[in-house]
């Protein structure tokens, strides 16, 4: 329906490309538009809380980019505003809506892999030092804020639980002071362990592997699968080390952003809280906070 941007020329260009009807000169003007029921907030991380609350107070539902806030205290301000206004908020971890993750969760819960005991996640790409907002500490840049949440979400989704304790190792050698690489461990109930690595300074890589007592499963391109290509789940019963017990499930192509938006819209139209609402976002933020605390303490931290 409408778009607003700091750069009006850029807003007009995007509007023309996607057939957006109205371009607003300011965010305030867009929020004042009575034709708009909900907004998507893709702003820099440090602006998420301010504009999400402003949107809620303007009687708009909000789909906000991840991470929803810079810390858990800020995220709870959004929850307070949502309760106060009666309007809903969801955090935009789009991968949860892709059919490959829906199927992965089904396989784990069906017992196909036996008891789920471990996970490994990697998410890396190269973002050279420069003016990019992802290189700014003030704006919430760095690898953990930018892509670390995917490992948290994946672990919570497949285990059906929240981590009990976490510890992180941070590399802040880049000039901007953000973490260019962070690794971490998370312990979940029942002893399930998740090891992850994220980086903004490595060759492009995404991988997720789940290990169970009876088999393992690899989500081949876990976080940014192309919308026009089928996805693959590789399942191996581990009968030997040469893949003779392996099989592949082909998941039909899907646009995970569109599926996410459909789910959000249907919930809002039905007067219901969207899937993975603000309380779920707070749980993600609690884990991020604990990882940052562990950098300072050098010890395990409880979310």
Image (cartoon, grey):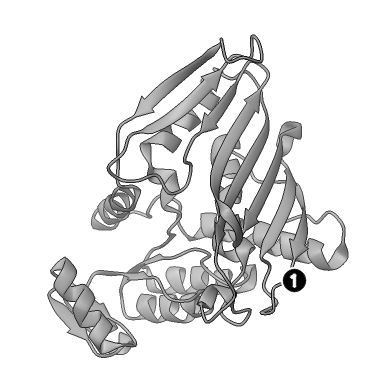
Q: In this view, does 140 lie above or below 270?
A: below
Q: In this view, does 258 lie above or below 80?
A: above
- Please rate how many residues cluster around mark 1, counting C-alpha atoms within 10 Å: few if below 14, some from 14 to 19, many from 20: few
- Residue at 80%, 61% (x, y): give it: 294
**Is residue 62 or residue 21 the one in the foreground?**
21
Please provide percent x and percent y for residue 266. Answer: 26, 51
Q: In this view, does 191 lie above or below 173?
A: above
- Residue at 46%, 28% (x, y): give it: 233
Image quadrant assignment for residue 23: bottom left
Q: Quadrant of the N terminus?
A: bottom left
Q: Quadrant of the C terminus?
A: bottom right
Please provide percent x and percent y for residue 46. Answer: 54, 78
* Number of numbered discs overlaid on the protein picture: 1
Can I make out residue 20 in this image?
no
**Is residue 63 or residue 77 the one in the foreground?**
63
Is 50 left or right of 76, judged from the image as shown? Answer: left
Can I make out residue 39 in this image?
yes
Is 76 left or right of 272, judged from the image as shown? Answer: right
> What residue occupies the far right of the structure in this picture?
298
**Is residue 278 or residue 210 the one in the foreground?**
210
- Residue at 78%, 65% (x, y): give it: 293
Please provide percent x and percent y for residue 285. Answer: 61, 61
- Residue at 31%, 38% (x, y): give it: 229
Q: Does dot 1 land on a helix, a strand or a loop?
A: loop
Image quadrant assignment for residue 17: bottom left
**Is residue 177 or residue 144 the one in the foreground?**
177
Is 33 left or right of 26, judged from the image as shown? Answer: left
Instruction: Please give the residue where the numbered disc 1 appears in the rendered image.
Output: 173
Please provide percent x and percent y for residue 204. Answer: 53, 52
């Amino acid at each position: 329906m409408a778009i607003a941007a700091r750069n009006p020329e850029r807003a007009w260009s995007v509007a023309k490309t996607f057939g957006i009807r109205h371009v607003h000169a300011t965010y305030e003007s867009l929020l004042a538009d009575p034709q708009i029921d909900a907004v998507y907030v893709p702003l820099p991380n440090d602006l998420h809380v301010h504009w999400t609350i402003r949107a809620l107070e303007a009687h708009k539902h909000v789909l906000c980019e991840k991470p929803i806030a810079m810390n858990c205290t800020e995220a709870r301000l959004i929850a307070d505003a949502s309760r106060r206004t009666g309007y809903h908020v969801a955090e935009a971890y789009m991968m949860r809506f892709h059919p490959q993750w829906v199927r992965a969760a089904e396989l784990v819960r069906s017992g196909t892999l036996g008891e789920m005991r471990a996970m490994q996640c990697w998410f890396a790409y190269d973002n050279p030092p420069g003016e990019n907002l992802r290189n700014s500490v003030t704006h919430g840049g760095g690898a953990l804020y930018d892509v670390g949440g995917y490992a948290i979400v994946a672990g919570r989704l497949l285990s059906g639980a929240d981590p009990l304790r976490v510890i992180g190792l941070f590399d802040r050698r880049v000039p901007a002071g953000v973490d260019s690489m962070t690794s971490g461990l998370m312990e979940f109930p029942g002893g399930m362990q998740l090891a992850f690595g994220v980086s903004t300074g490595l060759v492009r890589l995404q991988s997720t592997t789940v290990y169970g007592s009876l088999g393992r499963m690899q989500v081949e391109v876990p976080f940014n699968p192309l919308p026009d290509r089928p996805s693959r789940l590789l399942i191996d019963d581990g009968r030997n080390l040469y893949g003779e017990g392996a099989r592949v499930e082909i998941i039909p192509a899907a646009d995970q952003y569109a599926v996410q938006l459909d789910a959000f819209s249907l919930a809002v139209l039905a007067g219901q809280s969207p899937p993975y609402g603000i309380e779920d976002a707070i749980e993600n933020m609690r884990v991020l906070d604990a990882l940052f605390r562990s950098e300072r303490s050098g010890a395990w931290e409880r979310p």
